[in-house]
Amino acid sequence: MSTEPSTSPVAADPSIFAFATAPPEVTVAGTETANGVTTTDLLFEAEGVEPTEAYLVTPEAGTPAAAQPGPGIIWFHWVEYGAPTSNRTEFLPEAQALAAQGVTSLLVQGTMPWLTQPESIAHDVPAVQADVRMLRSGLDLLAARPEVDPTRLASVGHDFGGMYSSVVFGADDRLQALVVMTPTARWADWFYRYWQISDPEADYDAAMAPMDPVTWLPLAAPRPVLLQFAANDQYVSADVAAEISAAAGDTARTETYPDASHELDEAARADRDAFLAEELGFPQPD
């Protein structure tokens, strides 16, 4: 999913998202505890935020990892139609492993382009804004959990999930660190290339630009960012990766994995977990 870089980003304007301020309401569908980790299947919603499926992963109550409030991480998955991980399960094993280190995680389910398809300015602008509000509402949920120290929060996103995470990181300084995996620079790069969009390309680019990752990543500095790219990525060119790195600024670290494709690999996971452990202050997993 790639095109070459085009125009410079516009100025970021947080008012375009009309973020919900009321705490989300939560409905629990089920809970499982195994190996010192509790995984809760839940639904959350708030004003301006549609009901959203998520997993809440916490250290089991009564274990040493749950002895005091720990870091919180919100995870947003990739798009790969037909892949079993193209949903909120993508990071579930990773979040469960980190729970043993005292980390609480929320893994959210995206809507656009997972459950609805890009088609036009009239549809896509509010659809992207809706998933940004959803992610911000999920952060509200995570930060309010008794297991979580709200001064130790991070966001991780892959592909489209990374693009949404970049926007929320730029807009919300409660997040101390960000990991973005194989994103592109602009929504139109992928939406216009891989879907049938009814509007002229220049109009569509301009309409989506206020929400582009490269519009919001400059607001990340000086907070730490880890950008993860793959040397064998058919969707993200080296030029696009360089543009994203430049937008994230001097406090961003960029890693390119020589043996990885767009999905990334275990080396990327190890770097990601080490980065999160350092920035949020928890023991690195074995």
Image (cartoon, helix red, strand yellow):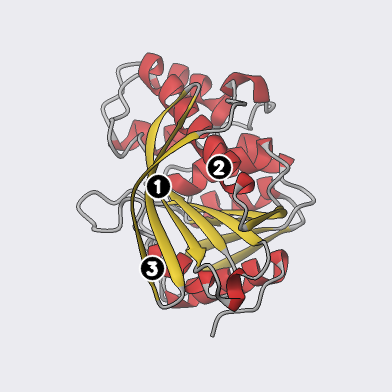
The residue nearer to you, when weighing 168 against 59, is 59
> In the visual, does 282 lie left or right of 39?
right
Q: Earlier in the sequence, mark 3 or mark 2?
A: 3
Say which residue label 1 marks: 54
Q: Secondary structure at mark 1?
A: strand
Say which residue label 2 marks: 141
Closer to viewer: mark 1 or mark 3: 3
Identify which residue is drawn at 65% across, 20% down: 15
Place of residue 160 in the rendered image (x, y in percent of width and height, measured from the top left): 43, 45
In three-dimensional space, the C-alpha distance between marks 1 and 3, rounded to whole angstroms, equals 16 Å
Instruction: Determine whether label 1 and label 3 are within 8 Å by CB.
Output: no
Place of residue 223 in the rendered image (x, y in percent of width and height, measured from the top left): 75, 53
Identify which residue is drawn at 41% across, 72% down: 265
Residue 124 makes an appearance in the image? yes
Instruction: Determine whether label 1 and label 2 are within 8 Å by CB.
Output: yes
Residue type at mark 2: give it: Leu
* Label 3, residues with CA under 10 Å away: few <14, some 14-19, many ≥20: some
Residue 103 disc label: none
Q: How many labels, in total?
A: 3
In three-dimensional space, the C-alpha distance between marks 1 and 2, rounded to whole angstroms, equals 11 Å
Figure quadrant of residue 152: bottom right
Say which residue label 3 marks: 33
In three-dimensional space, the C-alpha distance between marks 3 and 2, rounded to whole angstroms, equals 21 Å
